[in-house]
Amino acid sequence: MPAPPSRIHGVREGAERRLRGGPGRGGRPRGLAPGLAGRRREGVLFWAAGARKHRAKIQSSDPVSEPEAQSGAEESWRKAVKDAGRYLITVLAPRRGWVFPGLDQRLAAATAPAVVSAAPPARPYAAAAKTAKKGSRKTKQEESKKKQVTRRPLMSKPVDDVYLTWYYERPSYDVEEAVGMLKKFQELDFTYPKQYVYINVFLDMALQKKKKVDPFASSVLLPYRFTDEMNKVLVFTENEQEAEIARENGAAVVGGVELIKWILEDEIQVDFYVAVPAIMPKLIPLRNKLRRKYPSTKRHSMGSDIPKMLQLFREGLEYAVQDERVIKTRIARLDMPTEQIVANLKAVINDICTFKPSTYGPFVQKLVIRSSTSEGLLLNLDGLLPQVEKVEEKDEDKHAEDEEKHAEDEEKHVQESVRT
């Protein structure tokens, strides 16, 4: 049934009142946004024009039969509602953020008469667009742009005593100054005065192209001992005189091939294993068992000087590379004199630098010192790294090759003796 003329007249008056900016429902003022006034004005005028046209058709006095008049009124009303509604929604939707998928089909279905048809219903929703692949270039570029966060450059030194640390570069100290600060921290915090002093050494393991220095472990004899603990060392030898020398110098276990069975069955457990070259061919069954502790010339655990090896492994400090590029070890106690702490630190650094040729640049990138209860202090590397005289790269490369050949010759000699 068509809408009565009074309703259409009310729609027209409401539209005209909106155009004039008069009061809306409840007497509240209703205005238009400046950017939307033109578009809404057109839509409301279109709606009012359709309503007036429909009213004129209903009030016309032409001689028409009742069914024709009723169908004509319904058709004109349906068309006016459809056109005016579509125009208003298309004008207001972008401003209000409305989303109406398949708007035309839905309006046509709502205003059309109910007719049963055999045709399949139209799909009001379109298929979703294909999402970009994860590995596409656009997505990667977008992700990289999102990740790039612009930060202000860090300032060098703070002016005040209280400041935000992330606005300034991390300060670095000389070794003597840093040790003095650690001692002062202990006094202010009332902590244990004989706590250990630790260092974290960050290394540059890169060599030529894609080659890297393999993670290593070593032992170093410090100039000033800071603990009374002694490591247990086992000596492999079948010579009675060498065995007697080993016992006199503090070896925990001394023996020959008969010890292999006890070691494989975990009956004998010590901290380090040293051996003389003559017995090495007979120790092959222990290679997989001992692994890193297997006697070798690189770790100075194979040789003829038994007293020197025993002193190194009984009293020395063991360290190893962790996480592929970091060495964490203790070097002294905090109550020791500053000179002794610095001497132990330099001894460890000098031993670490022997594992990479100087032609590839400095091995140590960053050095941090701390105590058991204090924060880490970044150290200046000037004066700590060993000073190497400038020589030609060819000479150093030849020296490194000679050392590698010497180690390979020793291994070949051991393998040939095993075969025989």
Image (spheres, helix red, strand yellow):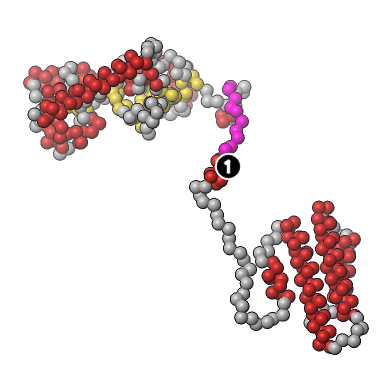
Answer left or right for 145 relative to 214. right
- State yes or no: residue 251 in magenta: no
Q: Quadrant of residue 112?
A: bottom right
Residue 181 point in image, percent of width and height: 47, 20
Which span of residues is magenta-colored? 148-157
Q: Quadrant of the C terminus?
A: top left
Q: Identify the residue position indicated by label 1 in the image.
A: 146
> Could you say whether the residue bearing mark 1 is in a helix, strand or loop?
helix
Answer left or right for 33 relative to 390. right
Amino acid type assigned to the residue bearing label 1 in the image = Lys
Q: In the picture shown, does residue 11 fall above or below 362?
A: below
Residue beneath the point at 39% across and 11% down = 390
Residue 62 point in image, percent of width and height: 91, 84
Q: Quadrant of residue 5?
A: bottom right
Q: Is residue 130 visible?
A: yes
Q: Quadrant of the N terminus?
A: bottom right
Count of numbered badges drawn on the protein = 1
Q: Nearer the viewer, residue 199 or 153?
A: 153
Main secondary structure along the magenta-highlighted residues: loop
Answer left or right for 88 relative to 330. right
Q: Is residue 274 visible?
A: no
The 10 Å Cα crowd at callout 1, few under 14, some 14 to 19, many 20 or more, is: few
